């Protein structure tokens, strides 16, 4: 009888998948070696959710352009990306999103915590154990729920902010 923890089976499967991709020619030798080294160096996930970063927060504001200019000019926050309804302003390795609030005064819409070893299934199961259900559909690297005090919280992978702000549309 094999008594390996589940994460050991997962690591073995991932190593086997990497080898298959290398042997099929899908992965070059260098990429294969880098990914194997990275996988071998991974530490097993600790129990719990492991918040590692404050990924971002999103403010709703009645005047998107005015608010964006204010944060850029007064606090030297660089505009990383602007869309019709969202401005992404840099805060170190994180960002602050600005979105229109319509006629409502400015408010914090939500904040996002980056989790080490984000796994949506594991996070959903953990939240369900605490009686917390997620809002809408979970993505592969993000999900949302409402705290008992009514605050909207987003959980994501720790590289969500970087990928969100530096992607192009």
Image (cartoon, rainbow, N blue to C red):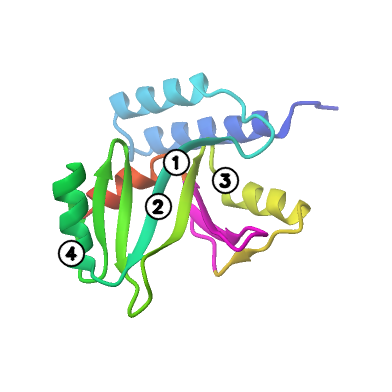
Disc 1 + disc 2, Cβ < 8 Å: yes
Q: Which residue is mark 1?
A: 54
Q: Nearer the viewer, residue 87 or 119?
A: 87
Q: Position of residue 27 (x, y in %)?
A: 33, 35
The image shows residue 157, relative to residue 148, as above or below, that is above
Which tag is nearer the camera, tag 3 or tag 4? 4
Mark 3 crowdedness (10 Å alpha carbons): few <14, some 14-19, many ≥20? some
Q: CA distance from mark 1 to mark 2?
A: 8 Å
Which tag is nearer the camera, tag 4 or tag 1? 4
Q: Is residue 77 visible?
A: no
Q: Which residue sits at x=23%, y=67%?
A: 64
Disc 3 + disc 2, Cβ < 8 Å: no
Q: Tell me, yes or no, whether the highlighted magenta stretch contains residue 53.
A: no
Seen as rendered, the residue at the extreme right is: 1
Between disc 3 and disc 2, whose residue precedes? 2
Q: Is residue 146 visible?
A: yes
Q: Secondary structure at mark 1?
A: strand
Q: Which residue is mark 2?
A: 57
Between disc 3 and disc 4, whose residue precedes? 4
The image shows residue 11, relative to residue 112, as above or below, that is above
Q: Secondary structure at mark 3?
A: loop
**Quarter of the C terminus within the rendering:** bottom left
Between disc 3 and disc 1, whose residue precedes? 1
User: In this image, 80 relative to 44: left or right?
Assistant: left
Which tag is nearer the camera, tag 3 or tag 2? 2
Magenta part of the chain: 137-156
Q: Which residue is mark 3?
A: 119
Location of residue 6 by image quarter: top right
Q: Position of residue 92 (x, y in %)?
A: 29, 36
């Amino acid at each position: 009888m094999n008594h390996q923890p589940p994460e050991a089976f997962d690591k073995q499967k991932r190593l086997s998948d990497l080898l298959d991709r290398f042997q099929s020619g899908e992965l070059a030798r260098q990429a294969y070696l880098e990914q194997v080294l990275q996988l071998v160096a991974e530490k097993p996930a600790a129990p719990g959710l492991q918040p590692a970063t404050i990924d971002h927060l999103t403010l709703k504001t009645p005047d998107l352009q005015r608010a964006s200019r204010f944060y850029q000019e007064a606090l030297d926050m660089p505009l990383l990306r602007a869309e019709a309804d969202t401005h992404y302003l840099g805060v170190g390795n994180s960002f602050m999103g600005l979105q229109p609030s319509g006629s409502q005064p400015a408010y914090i819409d939500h904040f996002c915590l980056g989790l080490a070893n984000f796994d949506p299934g594991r996070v959903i199961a953990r939240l369900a154990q605490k009686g917390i259900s997620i809002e809408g559909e979970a993505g592969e690297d993000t999900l949302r729920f409402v705290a008992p005090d009514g605050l909207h919280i987003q959980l994501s992978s720790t590289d969500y902010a970087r990928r969100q702000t530096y992607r192009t549309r």
